[in-house]
Image (spheres, helix red, strand yellow):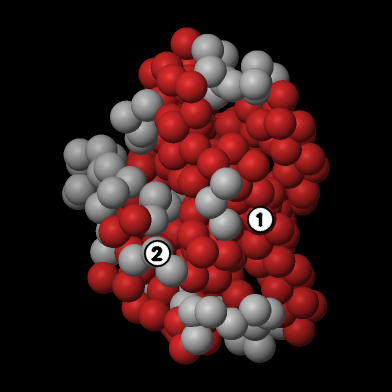
Amino acid sequence: MIAPDLAAPLADRLLALADDELILAHRNSEWAGHAPVLEEDIAFANLALDEMGHAAIWYGLREALTGESADRLIFFRDAGAYRNTQLVELPRGDWAFAMLRQYLFDTAESVRLPQLANSAYRPLAEAAAKIATEERYHLRHSSLWLRRLGLGTAESHARLQAALDVQWPYARQLFTPLPGDAALVEAQFIPDAAALRRAWEGLVRPFLAECALTIPDDALPRRDIPRTEHTEHLMVLLAEMQSVARLDPTAEW
């Protein structure tokens, strides 16, 4: 049984975890039929399905905690009620853009999930341990592509550097704490966001340098973007994703 004062902040944190996975899965699914080679078309589609499955796990934990239907949350919330990072809602971009975004997200997961697997809230710990198994494959996949693109042709390197110039400021939001996170950290439900970010940068910075990339530390925006702020791209994405469900909100599938 969870303490009442921890239930609301935990529900918010679970929502943020779920929304990140859901929106990234949607962006990745846009590559179906458009990847550079057939094998990758299949692989990246499967990866998108994995992310969707991870979202379902997080939404399921939140539903068990609050009683709110996951389907209602996904298909009948407006953009302002979503808690995903702006990084995952940015448009699909080119292949270098997609692979870099996946790498930055996967590396964040690689430092967050092992810590969550030690959570004092057992359902959260068990879910994180399960998800971490698939995320290890995701990180290997995106890392291989970054080396291939960064150390490949002049064009592939230029495209990857251009993607990094855009995405680096947004990636910081992966570690922006929610208002109730302090109580969850004190209860040992979740790890400290600042510590996670340091661990993430300790992995990302040397790897990007190995790929001959330059991190744009002076790029804007430099402030920490709260998860309540979104770009116009999320509204367009949700309009497409929610269109069928909103045709008849009372329908049962």
Q: Position of residue 85 (x, y in %)?
A: 39, 51
Which sits in the foreground, 146 or 241? 241
Q: Which of the 4 image quadrants contains residue 215? A: top left
**Residue 191 shows up from this direction:** no
What numbered label is drawn on residue 152?
A: none
Coordinates of residue 101 in the picture (x, y in percent): 49, 57
Residue type at mark 1: give it. Answer: Ala
Type of the residue with mark 2: Arg
Compared with 24, 42 (above or below) is below
Q: Residue at x 54, y 41 (%)?
A: 66
The quadrant of the picture occupied by the N terminus is top right
Per the image, label 2 sits on a secondary structure element best described as: loop
Which residue corresponds to the image point at 27% horizontal and 64% vertical from the top-left? 231
**Element under label 1?**
helix
Sequence-wise, the earlier of marks 2 and 1 is: 1
User: Which of pointers 2 and 1 indicates the residue nearer the eye?
Assistant: 2
Give yes or no for contact between labels 2 and 1 (Cβ–Cβ under 8 Å). Answer: no
- Horizontal side of 252 relative to 43 (left or right) equals left
User: How dense is the environment of label 1, judged by Cα within 10 Å: few (below 14), some, or many (20 and up)?
Assistant: some
Where residue 150 appears, as percent x and y from the top left, is 54, 58
Mark sitting on residue 56: 1
Q: Position of residue 98 (x, y in %)?
A: 52, 66
